[in-house]
Amino acid sequence: MRSIIKSVESAIKKITTNLDTKMVCSSLGPVKLEKNINMTNNLGREILIKREDSIDDFGCGNKLRKLHYILQDVKKKKSDTLISVGSLPSNQCKAVAKVACENGLNCHLIYGGDKQAKPKMAQGNYLLTTLYNPKISWFEHSSWIKLSENLSKIFDDEKNNGHSPYIIESGGSAGLGMLGSIELGFEIISQLQNNNSKKYDVVCAAGSGGTAVGIQMAAEFLDFDLEVHGICIGENADKLSCKATKLKDDTYKMLKLDSKLKKSINFYDCGLGIAYDTPSKEELETMQYAINKYGLIFDINYMVKTFIGMKYLIEKEKIRKNSTIILIHSGGQIGLFDNNDNMIEWYCKNNKDYVM
Ligand SMILES: Cc1ncc(COP(=O)(O)O)c(C=O)c1O
């Protein structure tokens, strides 16, 4: 136990020394890592849940870990306006609006996506986000590439208006944001000292892939037997693997460390379902089952897809035999209350006694 903690400390120290930035690790944690007995019994594997959903009451989850480090760079650069991008269910936009408000910074958010339109009424994540009164620019029915282009346009606009803007890319995994995900990996490993298992398999949602890469890097730093399985939420596995490889290389460069990440991370398409922000009947039933049997709120976008993906990997024996599985509940639970047509249709069909 002591030797693991020592290795963790020295790895963190190495990172922080190289970066020459004052950082506080584990300031958000430690977050509970707990066995879910019903899930363990149902799926026939020991399953621990990393309760990132309990980091705050707003379901910002893993985004806060990343923002904690990004904010230090914002302060260093004396920026006064955070700019970020997302779609209606975005936890990233919500988390950015929250930290901007708490730190006295301005916030300018870009909303859009292929099928995204400004809603008649704000609900769920979008409702919470707007209650922070950020400036919002909507780009309805626009591709993700277009949205990224608009990020730099908004950046220039803010600059021309006399502000000092700071772009936080979608996913929050670029640059210092990755330290939050590495920290998550360190925290998990330090919590496993009293567990009898010899090997671990982590399953997590993969949007930008940052969380998956960060946890895997922590395991590599500490030479700990842990494999990461990222369940793709939006992009397919091939595309995300390429992005994750670049993210890993960039992070090693940023840390001024030799690339040690020998294992490639496994990304899977098995949770993609119909599409992002379009929950299927199976996903909605799984969301209800998780509340009933596991005592967990899975949002209808990220966690429900991740859980279905994990079940598939277990069934198909893609996860190592006799390992302990760690499911990262990365937050986003407020997404259960998002304004979603599929959810409304499914709910009304199945719950006629409760509604008009
Ligand atoms: C709740 C939740 N989990 C996971 C992710 C994905 O994390 P990452 O971008 O690190 O892959 C996101 C954001 O995309 C999210 O909102």
Image (cartoon, rainbow, N blue to C red):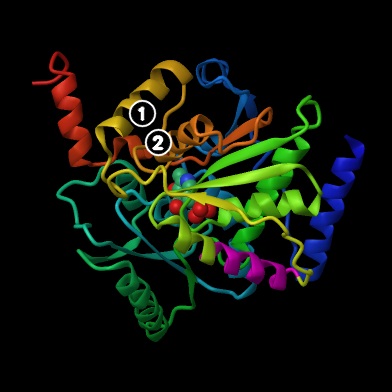
Q: Label 1 vs label 2: CA separation?
A: 6 Å
Disc 1 residue type?
Answer: Met
User: Within the image, what quadrant is residue 289 found in?
Assistant: top left
Labelled pair 1, 2 in contact (Cβ < 8 Å): yes
Category of crowding for the residue at label 1, using alpha-carbon neighbours closer than 10 angstroms: few (below 14), some (14–19), many (at least 20): many
x, y percent for residue 308: 42, 34
The answer to if 99 sits in the magenta stretch is: no
Q: Residue at point 71% right, 68% down?
A: 252
Label of residue 287 in the image: 1
- Using residue 9 as the reference point, say whether residue 119 is left or right of it: left
> Over which residues does the magenta segment extend?
243-255
Disc 2, SS: helix
Q: Residue at point 59% right, 63% down?
A: 70
- Using residue 10 as the reference point, say whether residue 303 is left or right of it: left
Query: Is there any visible trace of residue 27 in the rendered image?
Result: no
Query: Is there any visible trace of residue 339 in the rendered image?
Result: yes
Above/below status of 220 relative to 202: below
State the residue position of label 2.
304
User: Within the image, what quadrant is residue 190 found in?
Assistant: top right
Q: Residue at point 30% right, 31% down?
A: 282
Q: What residue occupies the far front of the structure in this picture?
A: 316
- Using residue 77 as the reference point, say whether residue 207 is left or right of it: left
Above/below status of 350 relative to 61: above
Which of the two labelled residues, at mark 1 and mark 2, occupies the earlier sequence position? 1
Q: Of 214 and 21, which appears nearest the observer?
A: 214
x, y percent for residue 329: 52, 36
x, y percent for residue 38: 52, 15
Disc 1, SS: helix
Disc 2 residue type?
Answer: Val
Q: Of 132 and 112, which appears nearest the observer?
A: 112
